[in-house]
Amino acid sequence: MKRISILLLLGVFLITALVVSCGKPKKVQEETTPPPVITEPEIKPEPEPTPPPPPVLKESQFVTVYFDFDKFNLRSDARAALDKNFNLLQEFPNAIIKIEGHCDERGTIEYNLSLGEKRAKAAMDYLLGLGINQARISIISYGKERPAVQGSNENAWAKNRRCEFKIISQ
Amino acid sequence: MKKNCLILLLLFFTVSLKAQERDVRNVFFDTLRTSDVQPTPIGVDDMKFIGTGTITTEDSTYMLYTTRIIRRDLDFYADFELVQIDSFYLRTYEITALDLLGWMRLGANYVVKLEVEFPGRNMKVKWQLYHTVNRQQIDHGEFNYNRAFWREIGHDIANEIVHTLTGERGIFRTKIVYVRKIGKSKELFMADYDGANERQLTENGSINISPCFDPNREVVYFISYMAGDPHLYKVDINSGVIIKVAEYPGMIAAPVVSPDGKRIACVLTKDGNSEIYVLDTEGRIIKRLTRNPSIETAPTWSPDGRNIAFSSDRTGSPQIYIMDSDGLDQRRVTYNGTWNDSPVWSHRGDRLTFVSRTRNRRFDIASVDTSGADFRLLTEIAMNENPHFSPDGKHIIFTSDRLSAGDIYTMDISGRNKRRITTTGDCSNPYWGPLK
């Protein structure tokens, strides 16, 4: 959010600079130009010989993995999600992550804690199988204590039976 | 000016009394009435002032609410049924006389007579228990506390009456602990058995769950995510001091203290999967009890500490099993329904109460004897969870979403006499503390 607003500010600054340099007649046209202008400023420091700063991995880039009721086996869509997350972990070799296992509200607190742990472990084992180092992944279960969405219907439940990926360090 | 202040103070006091009173009045019954014992009808006469001079508004409020505490306690108790006072049948206008005949006509076998004086800041209540038919006084006594402890006076009188008529200790001074959701966090709270005098035990903004009383000390064990991963902690309910008890790789969950207070059964996942372990009270492992790739969780001790019941999904869905406390001789107990979990052992040792998913994909509280026979459903509506017994084994506390987004309820072990204890919603995970 902060980043976007800074970029926007930069964009606005650029536009006003342009307006000032170009004079009055073009004013109206300049103002209607769409946001794509914003991306331009980043190209500027190119002549410097220093390497570009490493890209930053964000938690939102990971895909959430979903499960069936009272199950921890990986569905085909879950494996596809994990494949994407695997690619991210390959791309960012320093990232250390924690997989959070969650459940829907049905069933008891204790059972769901165990089930959430099994889900997180299933996701972790899949990534380990693809070759990710064990030292980079840990797991935690929240059972049904931290639902993603409120509600007592199949739609809400389906969204709550999940594994989320959290970044510990990178 | 001074007078105004006093009146304001008085007004405030009555209002706050009323506010405290409101939260536990929500009594309602399920259709289920499968009680094994016919409750004894008992009446509680209005409290009479026998001191000299006149009484203030404040004093009459104390009298009214203390009487209500006694009535509600006795009505709550599984062995009794409260006979409502009815001025049409009773001669209530007389100051000291007790209308035994009137109470007998109303159907009461017993009636409690209450008399009060207000010496200094104290409230002195004399109680007398009468048999209405024999017209005899059975027992009597007196409590003389500071009037700020009007609830305690009421609870102590009710405890005395229970003891006189049943020979057992009343539970009206016991505490309950439970979890309340505040925003994204879950904090531990403690209250009187009827939900009054609520107090917060944890305040760390994290997840605090699975509270369990030590039967001998005023200590509550619980699981907290306050340090990131879930570890086992304990809180001293008097000092509020919290100490970490155990930390193992993976998860620790579902702690439950043995009846002798020396061992803690719990779940550890350090072997890559939920297994039941027994720890000492310092958190050191005494023994691993289960070895299974399936989920083993929710241990509960038999009253003699020799057996542990638990749930396992080794057959595909959770069912209840019993084993020796050293992990040997595991046998399945439940066969009704597709999901039976979260067992608690009754205090007499003959039955297990648990969460069962039987019809309409609902979760109910059910009970079965330890051989697996005599399956009974104790709830019939909504989602119900977390059953635990009162320390006298006659009542069950549980969570239900029948009227709100999760509140604490109590009922008799037969499923009769359901009462709502919390009214705010977002409450769960209750545990009933021991008798002092």
Image (tube, coloured by chain):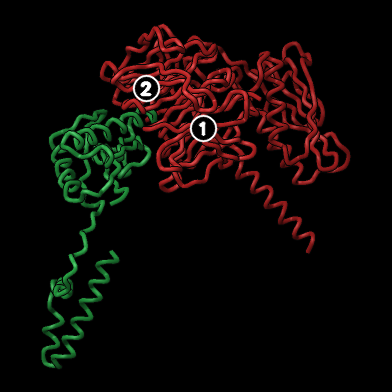
Chain colours: A green, B red
Is any part of residue B429 visible from this angle? no
**Which of the chains bears the disc numbered 1?**
B
Q: Which residue is mark 1?
A: B245
Image coordinates of residue B168 in percent, x first then y, are: 66, 15
Q: Could you classify mark 2 by the number of other residues whose Cα lies within 10 Å: few (under 14), some (14-19), or many (20 or more)?
A: many
Residue B43 figure quarter:
top right
Q: Nearer the viewer, residue B101 or A165?
A: A165
Amino acid type of the residue tagged 1 in the rendering: Val
Q: Nearer the viewer, residue A163 or B432?
A: A163
| Spatial CA span between label 1 and label 2 | 19 Å
The residue that disc 2 covers is B275
Q: Where in the figure is residue A99, as x and y percent of width and height?
A: 28, 40
User: At numbered mark 2, what does the secondary structure look like: helix, strand or loop?
Assistant: strand
| Residue B307 as seen in the image, left or right of residue B139 | left
Residue B320, visible in the rendered structure: yes
Find residue B315 and report its image quarter: top left
What residue lies at 21% left-to-right and 60% top-to-bottom? A54
On the rendered image, what quadrant is the C terminus of chain B found in?
top right
Please determine whether, in this image, residue B9 is positioned above or below residue B160: below
